[in-house]
Amino acid sequence: MPETALQVYYDGDADLGRLRGRTVAIIGYGSQGHAHALNLRESGVRVIVGLRRDGGGAGGGGSWARAVAEGLDVRPVADAARAADVIMMLVPDQHGRTVYDASVAAALGGGPGKTLMFAHGFNVHFKEIAPPPGVDVSMVAPKSPGHLVRSEFQAGRGVPALVAVHQDESGHALADALAYAAGIGCTRAGVLPTTFREETESDLFGEQVVLCGGVTSLIKAGFETLVAAGYAPELAYFECLHELKLIVDLMYRGGMKFMRYSISDTAEYGDYTRGPTLITPAVRARMQEILADIQSGAFAREWIDESRQGGPNFQRLRREQNEHLIEQVGAALRAMMPWSEEGKAAVQSRAATPSPKPAVTQEQVAAR
């Protein structure tokens, strides 16, 4: 690998003992929340899970039952926050301020010694949450969905993470954050330093332009182009969506160079000569506009306003995308694949349905 001046923290740079004798409250029990709570507990850390019994932004209902079933200490959010030395906010961005104002802020006003943590800088960076003086404010952001944070930890490995300190009142906020990262397994893979601003803005940009918005829009455009040209929707699905995982897995293993080494020369030549023509100057200019909206806070304000109004546009867009032809075709095709969600459901359905008794022929009746 090329030399880099960027510090990367590993197990040897973290002292998990810094969390011994301290109580960590995990606020929320979704994808990240369950992984953090269970990993920390198995690392010997005292953990409380803070939830709302009636659901809402900090989880509740089913989340409460799941956390209790795991043997975790589950309490209302305000009670968990008061009892904790470290409070990790793991609720959705759009609910963060409501949960913080209602149940967490009061627990931070009793003087120094508390640590407020986040796994995404959104609410602090865009000033939805303004932590009080006297408390450490830090971030440990695993670069992976929560289920992988959990499964990699269970396998004795970990996922990479980012670490940042927004407010260092104690003088050892970074050391404490690295201890937390070790507790969830991230220092096994490497933890990179950043800032709340850098993590938030780059994360939103990556989601909107490449990982989610860019990829899904490119897939749909390719699918629609083939279908409009008369190709079978099933064929278009395989060519534009199904095989994407194969390519992404190759890049995940060894970058674009390894992917290009692994595909045919024909595909590689098409990659070099046709791919760049899709990303025109107009597309790059739009990327700059999207980044500017993120940096200015315009996207954050739009999303927060949308959420406070009950998310009518969000729900409409979700319905429209879920009803797209590519989803209908894909669901039917995935039902044939036993590893897919639809395939698993089909297997379970067949297993639960008793086989019909075979018809008795006249010859069999005569033989009786």
Image (cartoon, grey):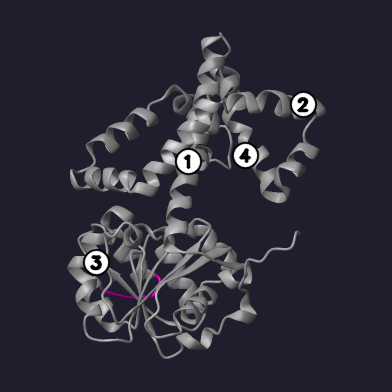
- The span picked out in magenta is 70-75
Q: Is residue 37 above or below residue 127?
A: below
- Asked if the stretch drawn in magenta spans residue 71, the answer is yes
- Asked if the stretch drawn in magenta spans residue 110, the answer is no
Residue named by callout 3: 100
Residue named by callout 4: 245
Residue named by callout 1: 345
Question: What's the residue at 55%, 22% (across, down)?
Answer: 222
Distance Cα–Cα, label 2 vs label 1: 40 Å
Q: Look at label 4 and name its amino acid.
A: Lys
N-terminal-most mark, 1 or 3: 3
Compared across the picture, whether 238 is left or right of 73 comes to: right
Element assignment for label 3: helix
Q: Residues within 10 Å of mark 1 (few under 14, many from 20)?
A: some
Distance Cα–Cα, label 1 vs label 3: 39 Å
Question: What's the residue at 75%, 27% (across, down)?
Answer: 267
Q: Nearer the viewer, residue 356 or 305?
A: 305
Residue 269 badge: 2
Distance Cα–Cα, label 2 vs label 4: 20 Å
Compared across the picture, whether 83 is left or right of 46 comes to: left
Q: Nearer the viewer, residue 79 or 283?
A: 283
N-terminal-most mark, 3 or 4: 3
Distance Cα–Cα, label 1 vs label 4: 21 Å
Q: Is residue 366 above or below residue 315?
A: above
Residue reaching furthest bottom?
21
Q: Look at label 1 and name its amino acid.
A: Ala
